[in-house]
Amino acid sequence: MNNPYLPRPIKIIDRWEESGIDHTFRVENDMNLIGGQFLQLSIPGVGEAPISISDFTDKYLDMTIRKVGKLTDGIFDLQAGDKIFVRGPYGNGFNLDQYKGKNLVIVAGGTGLAPVKNVVNYFYNNMDLVKSFTLIVGFKTPNDILFRDEIKKWSEKINVVLTVDSADESWTGETGLVTKHIAVCDMKDLDNTEVIVVGPPIMMKFATIEFVKRGLAEEKIWVSFERKMSCGIGKCGHCKIDETYVCLEGPVFNYVKAKELID
């Protein structure tokens, strides 16, 4: 009998530091995945939590994890060769066909870059499939920047705006909130523009408002919710907002739907 709550072990292939509190764990992969989906990651006797898949191939998948509590403390004690337990994948993910042939703008704040990293990599490797591609990504400080090497690589093909809220004396790049840079983003062809916004709720709220102020139709904006998913299969109700189960219908939503999902 198939038990949907039963996790299975997978082997950690590699791990590396992204920032002082964020590490990426690479594990073996035998699943069919869509960028934007998540897994329920667990250590028996310690706990379980939803973790976004930050990138994947048919051989491996990456999860970028912040050390914030008992479970992640336990995960950070694991090394290559150890096993961790997973359920999933869950969620709808991003429909890449939606963005093909369009001017694609992705706005990501902090760890919100992880759920869209696979989408960024897909179009970075297939730039002929979009008319243009702008990535606006913001972090609190230079020390919080994730995926530094890949952001540098993306800049070779993508119009990347990397900004920090608070700079130090070593920072020579852009500063200010991502909304400041949305305000000057080239958006002349609104009919052929699609936008993805992922990050903290307050950042997504004001970023989406900024795009609407720029004249972009709400149905051309896509967001991904970070909720406390528990069962992942629409049974427990932890992620439920009104009648919507975020774990089943999301975490990726069109803004027309997402703007109505208020706790």
Image (tube, rainbow, N blue to C red):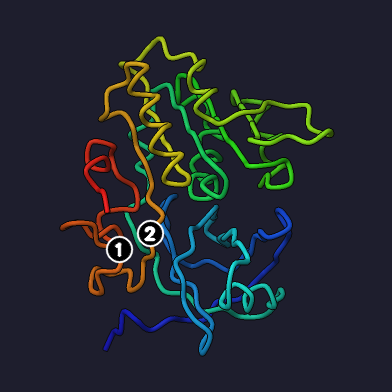
Residue at image point 28% right, 37% down? 255
Above or below, 188 relative to 169: above
The image shows residue 258, relative to residue 33, as above or below, that is above
Q: 10 Å neighbourhood of mark 1: few (<14), some, or many (≥20)?
A: many
Q: Amino acid at mark 2?
A: Arg
Residue 149 appears in view: no
57 or 153: nearer the eye? 153
In the displayed structure, would residue 237 be above or below residue 104?
Answer: below
Would you name the residue on which mark 2 appears?
227
Tell me the quarter of the image containing the C terminus. bottom left
User: Is 217 situated left or right of 133 in this image?
Assistant: left
Q: Residue at x 34, y 37 (%)?
A: 222
Q: Residue at x 52, y 32 (%)?
A: 126
Asked whether residue 35 appears in the rendered view, the answer is yes
Residue at mark 1: 239
Residue type at mark 1 is: Cys
Residue contact at pointers 1 and 2, CB within 8 angstroms: yes
Whole-number angstrom distance, CA of label 1 to CA of label 2: 6 Å
List x then y, in percent, for residue 49. 46, 71
Q: Secondary structure at mark 2?
A: loop
